[in-house]
Image (cartoon, rainbow, N blue to C red):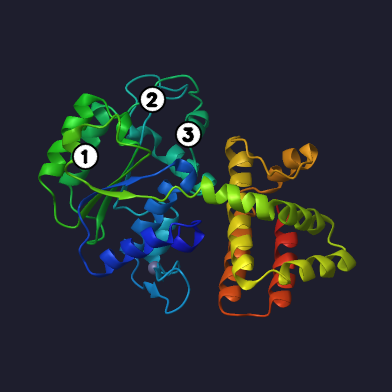
Amino acid sequence: MQFKDIVGQRDVINRLTEIIDSGRVSHAQLLLGDERDGSLALAWAYMQYLCCSNRVHHAEGDLRADSCGECPECKKIAQLMHPDLHLIFPNATTDRVKSNPSCAEFQQEFRDFLLSQQGLGSLDAWYAHLGIDNKQAMIRELDAAHIVQTLGMKSYEGGWRMLLVWRPSKMNNAAANELLKTLEEPLPRTLILMVDEDTEDMLPTIISRVQIVRLKAESTDRRRENAALFAPLLVEWLRMLFKLRMKDLSAQVEKLAALGREQQKQFLGYALEVMQECFMQSAAGQRCNLGSGDEKFDAMFPNMITVNNIELINDALNEALFAVGRNAYGKIVFMELSFRISKALKKR
Ligand SMILES: [Zn+2]
């Protein structure tokens, strides 16, 4: 997971990479934000940047730094297979694990879940993935014991040890008190990264010992404004990309290229968000409304965005965004982008 794959949050990301670069990483952090704003994906990209042996810095563009995505550390974190990365999350008994459930039992399921949802999965989607729709999943004593045991061991690779705690608000009191002890005695080169939506159900003693990083609520006001402005244009373009007739394509590209540069950027940013939402609908069944005014299209299109093409689509849109930012010729940018997305849609 790289920062470039995350929609928005540029100010937050730039601040985080600056802190990592300066070597002032605090040992316990809590990322707070709506799950639709990508808090889990951000945590993932954060750990990848922390471990990357070849961090990339950009002189231009709105993202100042990112992990390289190529070095062995990046690849291990991207696959969630880094031996010093430990995952803690709410869990419960399932058909397979009938008693004493703990994170240790569900590591593979959770990795599969994160990979298939690209870090955008909701709590409900996780429960559905485990097949425990209505049960109360929690983080319990057994999980806390796992944390203590893990942190008692040496780092495998000699670098950072990372504990990702998703939804610490689901900890029961015993688990929370155990975690508190580890927060009170920070260990060298050990990061406890927590991700949640709010602090309501968390112990004040825990909150007081972590550095809080708040994500921007991107998915509300600005989204509404952009939707009014760009939804008709986006839907028209996506419809055309399905069939891809050359005559229609050049007319469509003319229209997009005629937007001013700033509007082109906003349009591409909006398209990225809509694609993420479509992906969340197809992967996790979370309803997304394209707002095209055509119910059939709104219901059908999100199913075209799957784990097989979301990355291709994200890359194509991000590269177009970058090209527009560098004053590339609009018609060429949107023509190339149209071909790439049309091709990606066929890979679903
Ligand atoms: Zn790297």
* Residue 147 visible in image: yes
User: Along the horizontal axis of the image, is 71 left or right of 250?
Assistant: left
Asked whether mark 1 and ligand 1 are closer than 8 Å, the reply comes as no
The label on residue 207 is: 1
Q: Earlier in the sequence, mark 2 or mark 3?
A: 3
Q: Quadrant of residue 334?
A: bottom right
Q: Which residue is mark 3?
A: 126
Q: Earlier in the sequence, mark 3 or mark 1?
A: 3
Q: Quadrant of residue 73?
A: bottom left
Quadrant location of ligand 1? Answer: bottom left
Identify which amino acid the numbered label 3 is placed on. Answer: Trp
Q: Which mark is residue 137?
A: 2
Res. 311 in view: no
The amino acid on which the numbered mark 1 sits, given as a three-letter code, is Ile
Tell me the residue at 84%/57% (across/down). Answer: 243
Q: CA distance from mark 1 to mark 2?
A: 22 Å
Q: Nearer the viewer, residue 37 or 348?
A: 37
The residue depicted at 64 percent of the width and 50 percent of the height is: 227
Q: Is residue 169 left or right of residue 76?
A: left
- Does 39 sit left or right of 219 as displayed? left
Disc 3 + disc 1, Cβ < 8 Å: no
Question: Label 3, label 1: how many angstroms apart (C-alpha)?
Answer: 25 Å
Closer to the camera in the image, 36 or 343: 36
Disc nearest the viewer among 1 and 2: 1
In the rendered image, residue 229, in percent from the top left (x then y), is placed at 67, 54
